[in-house]
Image (cartoon, rainbow, N blue to C red):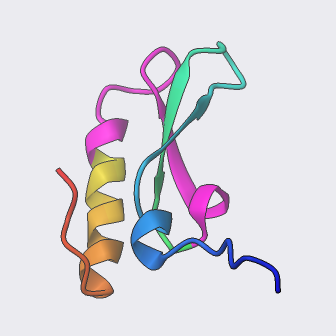
Amino acid sequence: MAKNNRMTLDEVLRPMIMECNNCGGKLIAYPKDGYGADGAISYCANCSPAWLESFAIFCMNEERTKRGLNPIA
């Protein structure tokens, strides 16, 4: 029997660290609609405006709250 490798909703709606395609730096993707990186707002400190990180956290926490999960600071 195959192991179930499905992510939980809580895991899907958490920030993910990736590599920025533009500068190669650390990129943080904030999922906003339950689809992981496919529906994420991606924030790279080198390539994105300063306000984008707080907006991404706000959107992610809205989705977490809609689904009964605790917001992430």
How many marks on residues? Answer: 0
Image x and y of residue 20, in percent: 63, 25
Front residue (pair 30, 11): 11
Front residue (pair 12, 7): 7
Query: Which residue is found at the position 17% from the left and 50% from the top?
Result: 73
In this view, the residue farthest toward the right is 1
- Looking at the image, residue 70 lies above or below residue 44: below
- Looking at the image, residue 58 lies above or below residue 44: below
Using residue 41 as the reference point, say whether residue 55 is left or right of it. Answer: left
Image x and y of residue 7, in percent: 57, 71
- Looking at the image, residue 6 lies above or below residue 48: below
Using residue 20 as the reference point, say whether residue 40 is left or right of it. Answer: left
In this view, the residue farthest toward the front is 1
Query: Which residue is found at the position 26% from the left and 43% from the top?
Result: 54
Front residue (pair 73, 1): 1
Q: Residue 58 lies in magenta, yes or no?
A: no
Q: Which quadrant of the view contains residue 22?
A: top right
Image x and y of residue 11, in percent: 45, 65
Query: Which residue is found at the position 40% from the left and 27% from the top?
Result: 49
- Looking at the image, residue 30 lies above or below residue 27: below
Image x and y of residue 64, in percent: 31, 74
Image quadrant holding the N terminus, namely: bottom right
Query: Which residue is found at the position 50% from the left and 50% from the top?
Result: 41
Q: Residue 47 lies in magenta, yes or no?
A: yes
Looking at the rendering, the stretch of residues picked out in magenta corresponds to 35-54
